[in-house]
Amino acid sequence: MASYAVEVSWDNTGAFSGQYDDITGVTEQATISRGRESEFDQMEVGRLELQVDNSDRRFSPGYASSVIGASNLVPRRPIRIRMTSGSVSGALFYGYIKRIKPQPKIGNRTMATIEAEDALSQFQRANATVSLQQGVTTGCALGLGLDAIGFPSASRSIDTGGDSLAYFWVRDQNAKQLFDDLARSEGGIYFINASGGFTFKSRSYNYTNQTSSASFSNVFDEFDYDLSDEKIYNDVRLTAHPRTTASNTTIWSLGDIPVMAGSTSASFWSVYTNPSSLESVPALNVASPVVTTDYTMNSLADSSGSNLTTNAVVSFSDFGETGKAIVTNNGSTQFFVTKLQIRGAPLHAPNPIQKRSDDATSTSAYQQRTLEMDLVWQQDSNQAQSAADWFLGIYKNPVPRVAMGYVAERSNDLLAQSIQRELAERISITETVNGISGQDYFIGRIDHQIELGGRRHLVRYILEKAPDATYWILEVSQIDLNAYLAY
């Protein structure tokens, strides 16, 4: 028999130690979903829905006498579900309340619905800014993005990654889109785990992780094996974005002539521009403005008056794609800012490069089926070609879509599996009806449907086929006759 703990940190501390934080006793049903529908999709926001007994109206935000306190019945409170079976225990979900919906009394039942989402929902609402970096790995870039939005460093497990980005920066970009783009360009996967932490697996995880975490053999209450033409790609087209650095030039200049009173300061934000293409770009070697060369002040707007540049002090901060200049008038009289400019070496993408890989035999058998992907952060065209060859090798022939489900309480082993399995883990499947014998898959999606009290706990996985071949990786593996090169 399994036991469950459903808890809400109503005081928002994350301690889950308040008198009414444990709501297990009034929770009747829990539905959890995390992951993605296929390996070509990005991770979806993890979701939890609870059906709770609201007979005492504790979950009614409009009820002033709620024992929880109406002021605590608000969105974004931390919520978690944990499970224990024998000596095995672990988390099933960690997230934040999205909404609380009390329901009218029906017969003798008064219920409420609590909906929650994991940290991916926070990423959707947060924007990240990272100053220009050179030679950082995909894992490092992800870490910088997480730093920018304040995600705790203690809650991260990040692989280094197989790519080194010659240049990396972001200016006020949606965090989830940034992480999606980085993972897609790397060929890796990221997700929020059941405990609420951020996990990133690089592309080499698929090749080096050759050992299954668990085996499932004919224990399924649901099994869906769909061998269709939906995952056949015999014409793969991937776009890379190499970056080049231009010579030092003026990348921003003040467009008007503002006046500043004596003993005042003003801030001027600049967005760097490549003068040859007029595109907004980051820049290297950005120099702080130099007196006379980069800024001048005068008593008249047309510069025909007294030169008051010596009365000015200019401080400057570079943010990669933008800069902030603070001009201070230390004199007692006003002056006009007749010149203010920023110099640096603009970084730009002259032309994206599309790399292709196709297979005539597959095209003859299944007609042309094109896969196009824009690898926003892939700056190496050779890597893009290797990725195209890799995708073609896997998907030029049909790949089945497999989903499985089991009732956890059928055995102690299945109860333990329902606790221990996580997204992106490799598992082995044997299913006699479809002739599957010891085939390996990665878990792409996990769903739980739980009736608390252990009455019924259904677990579903959407699976992604693991490569059949054994791969070797440059500078990591030794070549043998039964191994294939991976990028």
Image (spheres, grey):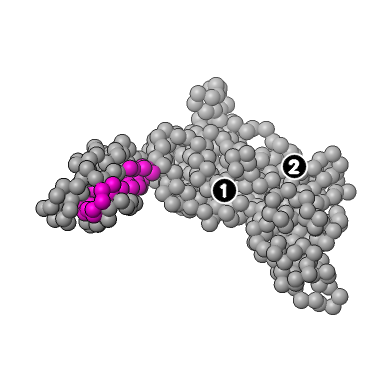
Q: Who's the residue at 57% across and 26% down the image?
A: 482
Going by the picture, which residue comes out furthest to the right?
1
Describe residue 352's horizontal placement relative to residue 433 as left or right. left
Give the number of the disc on residue 39. 1
Q: Nearest the camera: 357 or 455?
A: 455
Image location of residue 437, percent across then percent down: 72, 40
- In screen coordinates, is 135 left or right of 98? left
Specify the amino acid type for callout 1: Glu
| Residue displayed at 71% across by 55% down | 11
- Amino acid type assigned to the residue bearing label 2 in the image: Gln
Which residue is labeled 2 in the image? 420
Q: Main secondary structure of the magenta part?
A: strand
The residue lying toward the viewer, choosing from 326 and 275, is: 326
Residue range of the region highlighted in magenta in the rendering: 315-340
Residue 44 in the magenta stretch? The answer is no
| Up/down of 457 relative to 61, above or below | above
* Relative image position of residue 430 (x, y in whole percent): 74, 42
